[in-house]
Amino acid sequence: MDKIVEFLNDLEGQLKVNSFSKLTLSMKRNKSDQVKSIFVKPINLRGEQKLCFVFRHPTNDVTKNYSFEEGLVEITESLNESFLKADLMSVKQDVFLTIDKQGKGKIKRKMKVLQSPETVDNKHDKRKKRLIETQNNLYLQELDIVDKDGQVKRSREDKFRQINKFVEVMGHVLANHGTEPVIADMGCGKGYLTFALYDYLGSLAMKPKVIGVELRPKLVDLCNRIAQKANFENLSFEAGYIGRWDIEKLDVLIALHACDTATDDAIYQGVKSGAKVIVCAPCCHRQVRKSMQTSGVLKEITRHGILLEREAEILTDSLRALYLEACGYKTKVMEFISTEHTPKNLLIIAEKHQNGIDAEIWNRIKGLKEMWGLKEHYLEALVRDL
């Protein structure tokens, strides 16, 4: 029997007994094809059994739902025309198909130890584990994230993922920094993340004092009204400019997507106030991009505008991390959330570990600036004053 036919018979049998878990088609036959791979899983959509296909392209994913019969036709065509590898996962066994360039197939099977229950839970609308509860959540309703029934609005799903990822990260970061931190969220905008952080830390039996700082008075008034309606007693919002806002005691400073040098102003405020934790997600890097002066082989990297922009981003944030380290912080740079949901996905996390200025790091900063012909970095002038 042809191995592709044998593989498809296995798949059809698993669908009939509801033991199918997922299928991945990969290894393109033609490298010029736009679809890189196909991911298939069973779903229960409004009471009807379907196959959910995710067609993965280089820059986006396309999702389509098919009946079992339509899905089998799509998989058959894809195996015969587009892909050389198929991984089929089920409750009882996994089946792996590989096809060589001559069209000959090979199948491997891996049996599983059965667990109870034996069938797959494939409900499309099953409740997901979330750090922020949506039911009866007043601030999420007021901020237009969820509807009156507590369901996340389709147009706000990316924002809700960002909120949950942010509080997850901050929960880990703040675990060892006391139970009553004073937190400032600089340039907080409409306060999506500010509200969520206050809410989430409260669920961890912490008693934070959180201050949102925003330049636009109308947003400040809106957020204060919502905080009062939600009975968030230690959450408040103030009108102010990041570079000129000041506070005597500050444990945590947050600045997400403050534009260009406003991120540097926020970092400076955190260092100056002795914050134990500084977290920022930079946005725009114009100041360094305008100041870079490359020579020699480095000109090959920066002669294209888009590559110059990306190098400026890397250089700017690398130097920001170094300036923080020079001021006694341990830093790490991580992806905030997938670029599928937001292009502004870099997060710099700095935790205080010693006092004073580290002279050796300043030498490394000097070398990096000289390499890229950078005469100044806005943050350097600020922290040197300290």
Image (cartoon, helix red, strand yellow):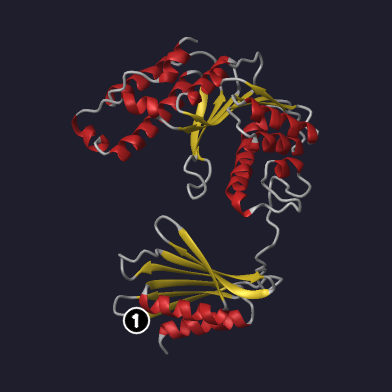
Judged from this view, the residue extending furthest toward the bottom is 1
The residue located at (42%, 19%) in the rendering is: 378
Judged from this view, the residue extending furthest toward the front is 218
Name the image quarter holding the N terminus.
bottom left
Q: Is residue 365 above or below residue 37?
A: above
Q: Is residue 365 above or below residue 42?
A: above
Name the residue nearer the viewer: 163 or 120: 163
Report if residue 21 is visible in the image.
Answer: no
Residue 48 at x, y percent in the picture: 66, 75
The residue labelled by disc 1 is 104
State the SS at label 1: loop
Q: Is residue 76 above or below residue 291?
A: below
Residue 24 at x, y percent in the picture: 48, 68
Location of residue 170 (image quadrant) = top right
Residue 142 shown left or right of residue 257 in the figure: right
Name the residue nearer the viewer: 304 or 197: 304
Name the residue nearer the viewer: 67 or 102: 67
Q: How many marks?
A: 1
Query: Callout 1, which amino acid?
Result: Lys
Residue 139 shown left or right of residue 70 in the figure: right
The residue located at (35%, 35%) in the rendering is: 309
